[in-house]
Image (cartoon, coloured by chain):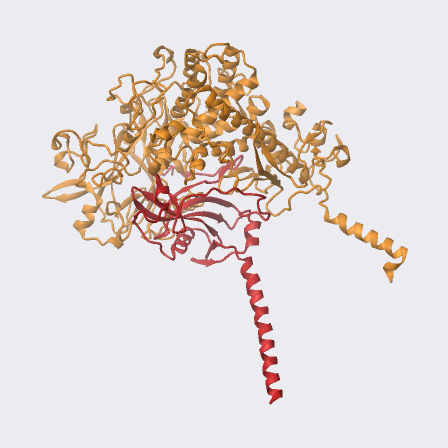
Chain colours: A orange, B red
Amino acid sequence: MLFSSNGGKLILLVLCHFFLTSCLSSPSKGNRKKSGGVSNSPSSVAAGYGRILADNPIILSGNYNLSADTNLNTLLSSRQDFITNNQFLADECDGASTSIANCIDVRTNSTSLPLQAADKKWAFQTNTDEWLQVQTFGHMMRVADNFHSTLENAHSSAPILGYETSLPTSLFSNSTHWNTATPLVAFANCGVEDQAFYSPSKFQLCFGNDSVFPEVMIAEDNTVIYHEMGHAFNHILVNVRNRDAGITPSADLGHLFYDEAGSINEGIADLWSYFMNQRAHFAEWALGRFANLSRPMSEDDPLHAPGIAADNNSRLSYPAYLLYDPNLPDEPIEDVHTAGQIISHFLVALGKDMSTQCGWSTSTSITTLQYLLYETFVELGDLEAFGSNADKLGGINSVNLSQAHALTWSRIANPINFRRFTQVLSKYLLLIHGQAGRTSCNSTNYDMDSYEQLLDAYGLLLFKNYNEDGGSIAAGRSLSNTQITAANRVKTVTISKDLLKLDPTQNASQAFIFDNREALVQAYKSLSIGGRIGQLSDLIDVGLPYNNGNISISPGELVGVALNLYNDSNSPMAGIQVLGNDWDHGNADGKPCGTFQDQFPSSSEGGVVASDEVGLPTAGQCQYITRENGDDSVLEVMQPVCMVQVAEDNATKWTFQGALQTQRRIEDRNCLDGVGGNPNECFVRVVQGTDQATYSMLNPKSNWSSTVAPNGTPTFNYSNLIFMEVSPSTPPGTTFNCRFRVRFTNCEDCWVDPAASNTKGDDYQDYQYSGGDPFKIINFEFIVID
Amino acid sequence: MLKKIALFFSFIALATVFYYSLDKTKRSESKKIAKGWKKYQKVKDKTVATTIKKEELVKDKLVQKRAPASVRSRILPMRNGRFLDGAKAKDYSNMAVPLKYKNKVSPDWQKRLGHSLARFQDEGTEVLIQKERPILYINKGVAEYREQVSINFKLPNGTKSSYRAMVDSSNGRILYTYDRTKIEYFRNKPTGMTHPLAN
C-alpha cells in the first residue's frame, strides 16, 4: 500500500539510494594530513585516471626538511595519470607485444576489500587509504611495464646479435618471466612499522609506515616501491630458467643476513629507482628524511663523505667501502644495504661511461644495463645447471655443477659473490657490445680496456678472464677464454689464501663459542621462523637445558661457533666465507685424507697421505675429487666436517665419528641423526641451513671484531655463526676437529686453478669445490667438556 | 494396522529429512575447512594440531579471497600421482621404466614436521603447513618421496613469516628451504648475539 502511492515510491527511491551509496567504498578518514592543494576528486579526472606523486615528496617540493604532516595534495600535478580501466585496482602487465593478465593487484591490507571504483575514476585525497593504494598501484604498474618491455626486447635482440644467451627461447610462450599462478599483490598499508617486505612464496609486497612519524607511509615514496619491485624482479630473473624447466626449488639472490649475493640484490634493487627516474639517489622521503637511511648511487652525491668522487682514483671501491654508510660515515656497518652501494655506484658509472663512449642517451644506457643484468641473473640462478640454451642442448652443466646439487653450489660451494657477478656481467658486456665485430658503440665495439679500468677503479677486476667456457668438467678447460689486460689491474688487490688464518695474537681465542641458553633459544626460534635453519635432533631438548653458558662445548648443547679469523696481509680481505658443509675429505675406507696443503692428519695420526696412493687418482682415493659431489661413484662419500680423536693401539688417531660410536658401542638412537642416520654425525654435527658463516671484511692485520667494532666489541649476526648440535651421549673429554674450509672473494688462489693446463689462469671447475684445493683449511679443535 | 504403517512411514520420512539436514550442515562446515592445510599451535609446552578454516587463511593473507582470473598451468611430468623432479626425471613418467626407491611415505610426516617446527616456539605460536605438491625426486635412477610445502609462522605478537620447504616424506625432515620472505627493516633492526667475552 505504501509503495503504490507516488509518495511511497519516492520514499522507496530515497531508501534505495541511501542503501546503494553506502555500499560504495567511501573515502576513509585518514588521520594523517590535512586536505588542500590539488582537488584530487573523482570529478577532476576522466575514467581510468587518477593522480599519483610523480616522484617522492622531497624531490617534488625541493625541501629536504619537509614536515611529516605535509599535505601531499600540494605536490600533486594537475595532470592526470592513467591508472586502470578496470573497476578494481588490478590490471595486466604489458610488454612490448605480450602481456600478463592478472599481473598486479593492490589493496590496503589483507582484510580490506579490493578497492573498487564503479566509475573507474581513481582520484582521492592524499590523506586516504584509497589514494595510497592508487599511488602504490600506479608506480608498480609503471615499473612492471618497464620490466616486461625491456625483458621482451632483450629476448628478441639476443638471436639477432647471435651470442649465447641465457634467456630461454620459450621465455614468453611459457610465461616464465612472471609468476602467472597468482598476481603480485601489494598491501599499501599493511600495518607493520618500519618495514617493507617481499614474500616470494606468496608473491606479495607489504609497505608499512614509520613508527616515529606514523603519518608517513612508506608507499608515499615511489623510489621505495621501485626498490621492492626490484627484489621481485631479481627473484623472478634468477628463476627464469628454473620455471622454464619446471623444477624446484627456487634460486635466491642472498641467503643469509649478510652475504655478497644479498648485497648485490640490494644494490640492484636501488638501481631500479635509477632506471625509472634517472636520479642516482634513493628514498629521500621514506627513509632519508626521518630515519637518515637514504642511499646515493653516484660518487658526486652531496651526501658522500669527503674523498669520494667520480674519478677513477676516488670511487666507492671494493672492499674499502663495504662497511660505509654515507649517513654515518665514521661507523662501520656490516649490512647488505651498505655493501650494495658499491654495485649500484659501479653500474651507474658504467651507464654513464657507455653514454660517453657510445654516444647513447641515458635511457639507452639504462636499457643496456638492464639487458646485462637480465642475462647475468638468469644464468647465475639456473638450478638445472646449464646456464644457457646452447649448453642445455649440449647437455653441458656450465654453472652450479649439476641439477642435483645446484642449490648447494649457488648458495655455498660456488656462491654468487662480487667476483662471480661482475665476471658474468662482464662476459655479457663483452659478448653483446665489446668483442671485435660489434658496432653498437659509435659504429664500433665498446672499449673493453676502458671498461676493465672502470671495474678496476671499483676494486672489482677480481678475475683474470671472462670464463666464457663456464665451470663444467666437460668444457671448462677450453683454453679459449678472453683474458683481461693485466695492465688494467692497478687498484684491485687479490691476496693469497695463506694469509687468512686463525688469530695468532697471543692469548687470542681460536673461536668464539656461543652457548648462552637464552641467546641460543632465541637464535633457534628466529632462524626457524625465517626458514634459515632445519629441525634439531630429537636428542636436543626444548629449552636447551644443557646449555650452560660456559663458552665451551658440552654434551646436549646447541652452540654457535665463530672462528676468530685474522687477515695477515697488508690489504683488506672481503667476502670471507667459512664452509661447514659435507665435503670430500675422506677416502672410500672411511679414513680422513691428509693430502691437503696442511697435510693433516699425518699417517701416524690416522690420515691417508699421498704416498699411500699410487698411480693416477681414482674414485675413492683422497687425491681424486668427486665429480658430482658424491653421486658419481659409490666409492665417493662426502663426509661431515667434524672428525673425532679415538684411542687406537696405544695412540690417538683421527677418524670420523662412526668409529667412536662403534668403539663405545653407542646405539643409533643415542646418535644425533637417530636410527638409520649418518654415524659420522653421531656426536657433533653442523645444523642444516647454518653450514656456512660469512664476514664482510677483515682489515689488514686485523680480525673481524676489530674491523667492524674498532672501539668496542661487536654484535654477531646469525650469519656470522655456524651452529652445531652436540649429542648428550658425547663422552666428556672427547676431542673433535672440525675441518672448516675458508676463502674470500678477493682471494688470489681461491678461484683460479694454478694447476690448470690452461696457464692463462682458468677458474676452478665446479666439481673442484667439493674438495680442498680452492680453500684454506682451518682446523677447529675442541674438547667436549662436561 | 494401517495406522501403524502410516506412523512407521512418517517416522522414516522425518528421519530422512533430519539426516539430510545434518549432513548438509556437516558438508557446509567441511567446505569451510581449507584442504591441504594443517595448523600446529604451541599450547602449554605441547603442540596441538588442528584444521584451519579458509576464512582464517584469507585473513592472514595466506590465500586470496578472489581466485585468479585465469591460470595457465603447465603440464609437468608425473608418476603415480606425484610430480617428477630431478635431472631427466621426466623419462620416468612412463610407468614401465623401473625405479628403485630410497624411502617410503610415512602417513604422519606432516604431523612430525609441524611438531618439530613448533616445539621450540613460544606458547601461542601457530605454524601453518600447506601441502603444495607431492614429489618424486629422482637422481640416477633412485627415487625419493618428498613433499613440497609452504610453511607459515604466526607469532603471538602478530609477526608473520613464510617460506617453502622440501620435506622428506618418510620422516617430515626438512631437506632445504627456499622462497623465504625478504624483510627490510628501516628502524629497530633485529639484534644479533652479544660477544661471549663481552662481560
Residue placed most toward the observer, B187 or B51: B51
Q: Is residue A416 left or right of residue A354?
A: left
Q: How many marks?
A: 0
Measured as percent of width and height from the top left, residue A748 is found at 31, 21
Residue A646, horizontal then vertical, whole percent = 17, 44
| Displayed quadrant of residue A650 | top left
**Residue closer to the observer: B92 or B67:** B92
Residue at point 47%, 23% (across, down): A158
Q: Is residue A131 visible?
A: yes
Within the image, what quadrant is residue A741 found in? top left
Q: Is residue B2 above or below residue A174?
A: below
In the picture as drawn, the residue positioned furthest to the left comes out as A649
Kindly indicate the quadrant of the structure image that contains residue A248.
Answer: top left
A73 vs B89, left or right, is right
Q: Mark yes or no: residue A331 visible.
A: no
What residue is drawn where x is 61% and y is 48%?
A: A111
What residue is rendered at 55% in x and 18% in y? Answer: A364
Residue A746 x/y as whole percent = 35, 22
Measured along the vertical axis of the image, is residue A239 above or below residue A428?
below
Q: Position of residue A507 (x, y in %)?
A: 28, 31
Q: Is residue B164 above or below residue A55?
A: below
Which quadrant does the N terminus of chain A fall into? bottom right
Residue farthest toward the right in the current orientation of the protein: A6
Give the side of residue A762 with respect to residue B122, left or right.
left
Q: Residue furthest bottom?
A: B1
Front-most of residues A396 and A406: A396
